[in-house]
Image (tube, rainbow, N blue to C red):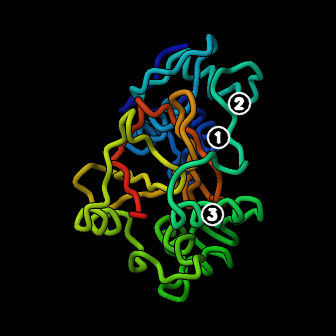
Amino acid sequence: MSFLSFGNTGPAVSDLAQLVVHRGFLAASDAGPIFDRRLRQAIKDFQAQHLDSRGRPLVVDGIVGPLTLWALTHPDRPDLALPTPCISDPPPGGNGRGRAALNAALAEVTHGAREEGSNNSGPWVEKYLSGRASTPTNWCTAFVCWSFAQHPEPPPFSFTLGARGLRNTFKRRGWLIEPTAENPLHPGDLVFWWRDQPSSWKGHVGLVHHVANGILFTVEGNKGGFPAPVQVFDYVLARMERLLGFGRIPT
């Protein structure tokens, strides 16, 4: 096949975009015959989480060649080395507040929480917004805030709809962390991403489940096309795209 990359147009790009939509990395409304920045970012997100036919991590470059196309068209390859996301109990570690929030989030995965009716809408989304905004509204940060609010003690931070705003709160309070071998990520830590561009006000946030063999497992809401569920994701930790950093609620 010919390589497809940013700026290409035509039926082949349309077919590619529909394939990326089907894999849950692009909203259907963003699919079309132009290889634009949204499709390029969706391809990078996919590449950061998947392996090629040899079981090796894909290069994260936003270019679709034979290896990336193979990964896109083989979603059920049984012998890939990448661990399968699961909703099992997290391993030991972390503090009580973070683990409680993670357990609340995992329960929502089990219950099948997702958007309903239209994008960023439905009773699950309304629950996470907690009456502070009306649908349709981006809800990834509301989901994290709701998860922490399920603890019997008051939440450790104020409700917000913005992932960037939540990260700024963590920064002001000295809660941002730099994972190391001596201080690894714990269940219930937060992971922050930027969206569109690094300087944009837009962001995304999720809860750390655990790290195993260099793979970061998270629980996130409001990621992917409609009907976006609350679900477990996995990333090659050393090759994460759009990463702003990590945060941890103090003990």
Name the residue type under label 2: Pro
Distance from the alpha carbon under mark 1 to that under mark 3: 23 Å
- Secondary structure beneath disc 1? loop
Precedes in sequence: disc 1 or disc 3? 1
Q: Which mark is residue 23?
A: 1
Q: As displayed, is residue 181 above or below residue 226?
A: above
- Binning the other alpha carbons within 10 Å of mark 1 as few (below 14), some (14 to 19) or many (20 upward) gives some
Q: Nearer the viewer, mark 2 or mark 3?
A: 3
Q: Quarter of the image holding residue 38?
A: top left
Name the residue type under label 3: Ala
Q: Looking at the picture, how far across and down is residue 217, in whole percent?
A: 57, 43
Q: Dots 1 and 2: beta carbons under 8 Å?
A: yes
Q: Looking at the picture, how far across and down is residue 109, in whole percent?
A: 70, 59
Residue found at x 62% / y 24% = 71
**Residue annotated with mark 2:** 75
Residue found at x 26% / y 57% = 200
Q: As displayed, is residue 246 above or below residue 73?
A: below
Q: Looking at the picture, how far across and down is residue 231, in whole percent?
A: 65, 53
**Residue annotated with mark 3:** 105
Q: Which residue appears farthest toward the top when viewing the image?
A: 54
Precedes in sequence: disc 2 or disc 3? 2
In the shown orientation, is residue 63 left or right of residue 88? left
- Secondary structure beneath disc 2? loop
The one of 34 and 175 positioned closer to us in this rendering? 175
Residue found at x 59% / y 45% = 233
Distance from the alpha carbon under mark 2 to that under mark 3: 25 Å
The one of 186 and 22 positioned closer to us in this rendering? 186
In the shown orientation, is residue 156 left or right of residue 136? left
The one of 230 and 144 positioned closer to us in this rendering? 144
